[in-house]
Image (tube, rainbow, N blue to C red):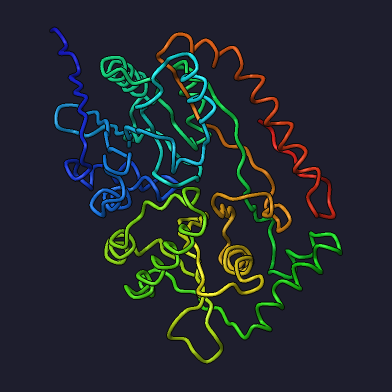
Amino acid sequence: MVESKTRYNLVWTNHISEIPQGAWDAMAKPLKTPFLEWAWLHNMETSGSTTARTGWLPNHLTMWRDRELIAAAPLYVKGHSYGEFVFDHQWADLADRLGIEYYPKLLGMSPFTPAEGYRFLIAPGEDEDEITAKMVNEIDHFCIRNQISGCNFLYVDPEWKPVLERQGFSAWLHHSYVWQNQNYHDFDHYLKAFNANQRRNIKRERKAVDQAGLQFKVWQGEQVSLGLLSQMYRFYSDTCDKFGWWGSKYLTRKFFEQLHSDFSQYLLLFAAYHAGEETQPVGMSFCLTKADRLYGRYWGSVDEIDCLHFEACYYSPIEWAIQNNVQIFDPGAGGRHKKRRGFPATPNYSMHRFYEPRLSQILRTHIDRINDLEQQEMDAINQDLPFKQEPVQFEV
């Protein structure tokens, strides 16, 4: 008897709506991250947030065995590097000096979301290395055929990183500021980890919000109303406007409002109100939670209120995280002010392949030195954390 060869079919699509939600989510929902689920990515597309016009053209790759979806990769063709939070402008500048067209490029990430967890979605029971190799081979052909300079996967799942390295991708080290639960009983227990000076500072910052006459209310899941999401869009929009292009203002009002019907199970809002006036929030942070993870995404306020940002984006979420046995809180993109409030520099990786030989050679020659310098910066940050115990160390 002659065994028939397994038939695989690789298909590209610009619309996730063409892929069955149930088949996609059978692979995405078991993951720790909510940002690769069908409803989140579909909302990005139908709301007008990820489009060719915004420079985020969806170009997802799927893999089928006969009619069974066995793998998928959320991918985007990019005409710029904005909204990624992995700043590769130095590579674009180098390419320009060499006379190389850097854009377009192919990008794998959950758009505008600097949170670890990107990977190919692969059905349980499949050979991950084999499936990844077939998909990478198709990506290589696609990029070369369409004169795309490179393929980049950002904020990759650390368990998926070695799979890509075996496919010849180069790992570029970065850092985020991420809070980790050390079996804290409550917020006061958490404060005891700090040195006396920073403990006083945090208490002072929280007291400033109280003295402004503000009270916080947490809205979760189905409690998050359409009105609150509309208000969150206004806060998001105003905050983005304050920071210009750094604000990465891509999400539309429709995106926020559609979350009410198709993604409410993960929503978490921390809203500040004037005491006795719980009708209109004066400030709010937008978070998502899944399993033992908490993700901070956006925030805004109607006025500049002393320390409100710290309370809405860090202290209230940390307090909630402790109460709800959350182990990891990633507050989103931002600067070093996070380390003073309990967020050590934590490694994450992006994975890269250039198809232009000169860029590829430069990447491979210098990436180890680039990563060494990044590791030195992380070590310096974590040597200066305001904790009583020994500085935090991370193995890379």
Q: Residue furthest bottom?
A: 276
Judged left or right of residue 302, residue 204 is: right
Query: In which image quadrant can residue 106 be found?
Result: top left
Q: Position of residue 213 (x, y in %)?
A: 62, 86
User: Looking at the image, how many numbered discs can be counted on the residues?
Assistant: 0
Residue 141 lies, with reference to residue 38, above or below; the image says above
Work out whether 123 lies above or below 279. Answer: above
Which residue is found at the position 56% from the left and 89% from the top? 275
Give the residue at x 50% y 45%: 115
On screen, residue 13 versus residue 245, left or right, reads: left
Which residue shows up at 45% across the image and 56% down it? Answer: 290
The residue under the point 50% across, 64% down is: 299
Residue 280: quadrant of the picture: bottom left
Above or below for 224 versus 176: below
Instruction: Residue 289: tell me if it is visible.
Output: no
Is residue 380 shown to the viewer in this render? yes
Quadrant holding the C terminus: top right
The foreground one among 286 and 323 is 286
Image quarter where the N terminus lies is top left
Residue 134: percent from the left, percent from the top? Answer: 31, 19
Q: Position of residue 192 (x, y in %)?
A: 80, 64
**Residue 87: x and y, percent?**
53, 35
- Front position in the image: 271 or 25: 271
